[in-house]
Image (tube, rainbow, N blue to C red):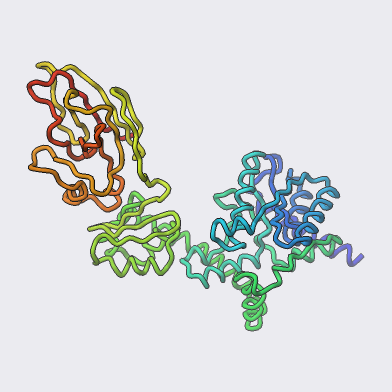
Amino acid sequence: MYFCVVYTLITAMLLDVVSSTIGSHVQREGGVVLVALSGGADSVCLLLSLHELGYDVVALHCNFELRGKESDSDELFVRRLCKQYEIKLEVKHFRTSAYARHRGISIEMAARELRYEWFSQMCDALSAQAIAVGHHRNDQVETMLLNLVRGTGLHGLTGMQVMSEQRVLRPLLSLTKQEIEDWLRERGQTWVTDRTNLDADAATRNKIRLEVIPLLQQLNPAFVESASRTMQHLSEAELIYKRGICAEMETVCPDGTHIDITALKNSVSAESLLFEIMHPKGFNSTQINEVLNTLDGEAGTTWESDGWRLLRDRRQLILQDKGKLVKDYSSLLPLEGTVSLPCSCQLIISRAAVDFSFVIPRSPDTACFDVEKLQLPLAVRTIRKGDRMHPFGMKGSRLVSDILTDCKLSLFEREQQLVVVDREDTLLWLVGIRVAAGFGIDTSTRNAMTLRLSHI
């Protein structure tokens, strides 16, 4: 009788915690919930608890082919488990080592990228509410310590959220590893153990789990619980912190890419503000400190993360998304029509007879040429090293790079500058800035071609 009472209490407690944790994020009748099922205690508990609570679950198992027969044994275990409980299972094999070599990243990072990419694909394919993973309270503390070792801001000390922006759901986040395993033992449910999780040399996280946390528990046996409470306090403090950061951001970096250096230096905390702008874009603490130390330096210095570049310009810091860079762009232009450009603009080409009513446009966004003076067809392309042109109203030709420097364009703007050229690659128009001499409308012109830059 005693064991039945304990079993009932443990089962009820865990199911109540899971239900209340995810109640506002997914609905029992709202569609499929995907469950990442490795076969370990956490994922088995997650799958069975959601199944018992009445959620429509589909298990996803990744075989990373890293441990030979053990990987295959884990796959066999999850197949039998899902068959026992009549739960649908999807299995995916990955050539993880080859992928890691190709990407030049660690095995751990490769496995993470592969599984979450597949999870996201399955979430879309099955119109799932979320992808549930088995992270628990111990994982929270490990993550906080890992971030602390690597260097982090306030957000890195608050841990993982129950539901992330990537639809990743963590129903077990408030439970400890011990509570999860006790729940399974009381049910007589087995699980598999990945031996690499017990190898302190396999990954930094394992060192924290197997060496650092036990050492801290010698100082405070309730370290995991006390650290969790601290993370909760920090999470609440972050709400106030974010409100202040957002207010400062409106002045310092209103568009998200141009940082006013004077406003940054006059902010309450330039270091914290710059960290919150740059760190989410992949810049590390060393780079951020270098930027801070060169706010009064010369223009032209750049820093790079995996996806972004940052330029120290004259009066501002400029962020550039590498994914939107235009390199070696070139496109032929029709005699009339509209051409979409890679800079979120369009080039509208029109032709007209020139008579007494024709008005030559004077906007820098418009170029007007005498058709008979052109070597057609025309093309639009990015600038190249050594490009020269003879600007209208000036004597002789000049390097395009010098013209752009005189116009006080930033390095990033100069790199992306477009030009219109003729069949002989003669520069006719520095798009949006200046036209070349020798191709304009005069008293003998009969037909004009007008190119107008339109910002979408």
Residue 199 image position (x, y, % from top left): 69, 73
Q: Quadrant of residue 218?
A: bottom right
Looking at the image, how many numbered discs can be counted on the residues? 0
Rendered position, 115 above or below 425:
below
Look at the picture and state if 254 lies above or below 349.
below
Q: Is residue 16 left or right of residue 6?
A: left
Residue 244 in view: no
The residue drawn where x is 58% and y is 57% is: 161
Q: Residue furthest right?
A: 1
Where in the figure is residue 114, as x and y percent of width and height?
62, 53
The residue at 26%/49% (across/down) is 385
**Which residue appears farthest toward the bottom when viewing the image?**
219
The foreground one among 222 and 101 is 101
The image shows residue 327, relative to residue 220, as above or below, that is above
**Residue visible at 68% across and 40% down?**
31
Q: Based on the displayed image, in which of its 4 quarters is residue 32 positioned? A: top right
x, y (%) of residue 191? 80, 61
Residue 185 in view: yes
> Is 46 in front, or is 14?
46
Quadrant in which the N terminus is drawn = bottom right
Residue extending farthest front: 424
* Residue for point 84% across, 52% down: 80
Q: Quadrant of the C terminus?
A: top left
User: Percent x, y for residue 194?
Assistant: 74, 65
